[in-house]
Amino acid sequence: MNEDELISVTQEAIMLIITLSAPIMIIGLVVGVMIALFQALTQIQEMTLAFVPKMLAIFVAIMLMFPMMATALQAFTERLADRIINIG
């Protein structure tokens, strides 16, 4: 495996990580902003109010997106295995 192939695999892996994690992070961000706005409007400063809804929203997002994430990871792993086989 030369440097170009190694850079290509690394770029593909980084893009896959960003593609898989971005929707979950955005959901956490949106829920966090909504909770912060609610707390600012009502002046309720309870830490569990900020933590629990974000945790539940991220958990639901992961459960809903898991089939897509697994398919993308499987496809990447198969492409990587094919590259390894072609080396030898």
Image (spheres, rainbow, N blue to C red):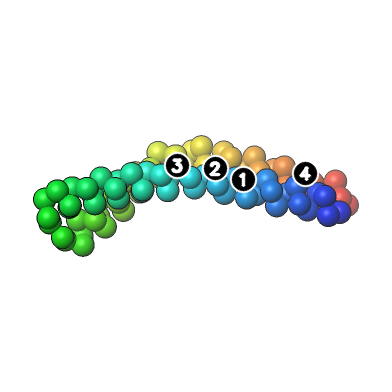
Element carrying mark 3: helix
Question: At 36% from the left edge and 48% from the top edge, which residue is drawn?
Answer: 29
Residue 75 in the image: above or below residue 44 = above
Labelled disc at residue 74: none
Residue 62 in the image: above or below residue 2 = above
Identify the residue position indicated by label 1 in the image: 15
Q: Earlier in the sequence, mark 3 or mark 4?
A: 3
Amino acid, disc 2? Thr
Whether residue 70 is visible here, answered yes or no, is no
Labelled disc at residue 23: 3
Amino acid, disc 3? Pro
Amino acid, disc 4? Asp
Q: Nearer the viewer, mark 3 or mark 4?
A: 3
Question: At 45% from the left edge and 42% from the top edge, which residue is drawn?
Answer: 23
Question: At 31% from the left edge and 53% from the top edge, which residue is drawn?
Answer: 55
Identify the residue position indicated by label 4 in the image: 82
Element carrying mark 4: helix
Q: Nearer the viewer, residue 38 or 1?
A: 38
Identify the residue position indicated by label 2 in the image: 19
Q: Residues within 10 Å of mark 3 (few under 14, many from 20)?
A: some
